[in-house]
Amino acid sequence: MKKSAELKQPLSTKNAFNRALTFHVILAVLLVVSIINAPKSMPPQGLDLKQADRIVQATAISSQQVNNEVKQLQDQQAAADKAQADKLAAMQKAAAAALAAKQQQAAELAAMKAQQQALQQQAAQQLAALKQQQADAAKQLADTKAATVKAQQQAKLQQAAKLDLAKQMAGEETQLDKQRNQQISNQISRYTALILQAISQQWLIPPNVDPSKYCVLEIKLGDGGVVQAVNLQKSSGDPQLDRSAIAAVYKASPLPVPADPQVFAQMQDINLKVRPEDVQA
């Protein structure tokens, strides 16, 4: 609005100046025309040639003054037009500079906004990535904890199962051992009775001995039941009876022994209680 007012004011001055110039030009033209069209008359009587020349010169001077004034007005108008044009050019240049500065400022502002938006977008992306990383880490930690708890539970279950199996196996082993020991004990009892029977068949009991007396013999057996040695562990108190019992053991060799190596191993070195009354029976 301010620039429009400044532009309108010089235009009003210019119009006034143009009107004044036009008025003076018309006046000068009328004056010249009136002079040219004036009737040529003889100089009045009583006037000499010098006076007539002075009148013509005065008229020429008046025309020259008008021309000078017109030229002066034209020069002033040209100067005013040039000043106005320079002022207008300067104003246009200033306006163009201001517009360029405004456009530059707007461009810089737009660039700053774009940069700020880019930075905000980058920060938002980084924040989102960080949140995603945190979420992934939390999920991984939760999965790890869950897997650890599950593994611990499975380990406990496996340990409990192993303990149960071990107890079961131990119980079964114990039962098998009992059964096996019972079988071995039965085998030992059986073959001990067979050995006593074989010895009694070979025992020549001395006459007039107390049948209730007994002796304990340690018998060492080899493969196949061969008697390797007989030692008197406890005497019957009757040397003759003790010697006859030892002799009967050697005569009964090889003694009956079990085929099971485990049972035979427990019977390779046995102690037998022998007495005459068992033989008589």
Image (tube, grey):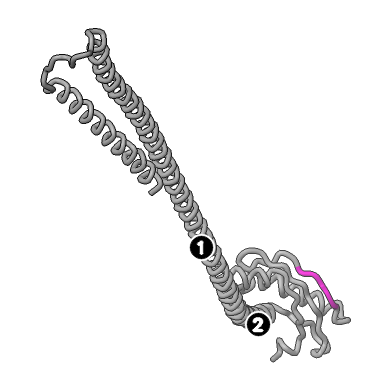
Q: Main secondary structure of the magenta part?
A: strand
Tell me if 16 is positioned left or right of 161 in this view. left
Residue 158 sits above or below residue 120 on the image: below
Q: Amino acid at mark 1?
A: Ala
**Relative to 132, is 221 on the left or the right?**
right
Q: CA distance from mark 2 to mark 1?
A: 78 Å
Q: Is residue 192 visible?
A: yes
Magenta-drawn stretch contains 233 = yes
The local crowd at label 1, few if under 14, some if 14 to 19, many if 20 or more residues have their Cα within 10 Å, is: few
Residue 7, percent across and down? Answer: 35, 41
Q: Quadrant of residue 72?
A: top left
Residue 40 drawn above or below residue 15: above
User: Quick one: 137 or 46, which is closer to the camera?
Assistant: 46
Q: Residue at x 60, y 68 (%)?
A: 261
Of the pair 208 and 49, the residue shown nearer to us: 49
Q: Secondary structure at mark 1?
A: helix
Residue type pointed to by label 2: Ser
Q: Residue furthest front?
A: 46
Part of the protein shown in magenta:
230-234
Q: Position of residue 194 (x, y in %)?
A: 63, 80
Mark toward the start of the polypeptide (2 vs 1): 1
Q: Residues within 10 Å of mark 2 (few under 14, many from 20)?
A: few
Q: Which residue is mark 2?
A: 189
Taking 188 as reference, is 117 above or below it? above
Residue at mark 1:
135
Above or below, 122 against 161 in this view is above
